[in-house]
Amino acid sequence: MWKKGKKRNDEESAGGDSDGAPPSKKLAKAESDDDGIVVCEISKNRRVSVRSWQGKVVVDIREFYIKDGKQLPGRKGISLPLDQWKVLRDHIEEIDEAVKENS
């Protein structure tokens, strides 16, 4: 539910980059985060990471924001357990075809 009176600042905006250009199709090279998480940045404020959460490995696609000079994970995102990640990975060609048909 929306909270009344709360506005998102520029770092939390859903659009990612502020210049309005679409995010690059090419993923940035993988980096190691402070917590030992492998991270690929897909835009200025969006990351794909693989991490362990509650003892299970998840693929996390999430928006980040900056607070006090630190990049922190936002509420917008999804964590896929390995079984769901494998389903998505196995259907990537069909997803690509659907994107091509609709663009």
Image (cartoon, rainbow, N blue to C red):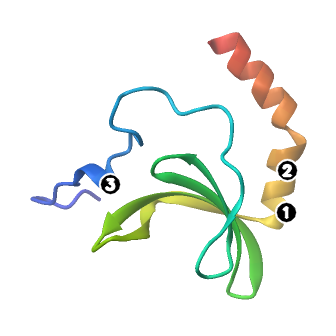
Label 1 element class = helix
Whole-percent x, y for residue 76 in the image: 45, 57
Residue 48's place in the image compared with 97, above or below, is below
For discs 3 and 1, the disc positioned in front in the rendered view: 3
Q: Mark 1 highlights which residue?
A: 83
* Residue at the (32%, 54%) spot, across then down: 12
Query: Disc 2 to disc 1, how far (Cα)?
Result: 7 Å
Q: Residue drawn at (37%, 28%), measured in percent from left and top?
A: 20
Task: Tell which tag, 3 or 2, sits nearer the viewer.
Answer: 3
Dot placed on the residue nearer the N-terminal end, 3 or 2: 3
User: Disc 3 marks which amino acid?
Assistant: Glu
Residue 23 image position (x, y, % from top left): 53, 33
Callout 3 crowding tier (Cα within 10 Å): few <14, some 14–19, many ≥20: some
From the image, tell me which residue sits under label 3.
12
Secondary element at tag 2: helix
Residue occupying the point 59% across, 32% down: 24
Give, as a three-letter code, the residue at label 1.
Answer: Asp
- Left/right of residue 55 with respect to residue 91 in the rendered view: left
The reply, left or right, for residue 55 in relation to residue 21 is: right
Residue 32 or residue 91, whichever sits in front: 32
* Badge 3 or badge 1: first in the primary sequence: 3
- Whether pointer 2 and pointer 1 mark residues with C-beta atoms closer than 8 Å, the reply is yes
Q: Is residue 33 above or below residue 64?
A: below
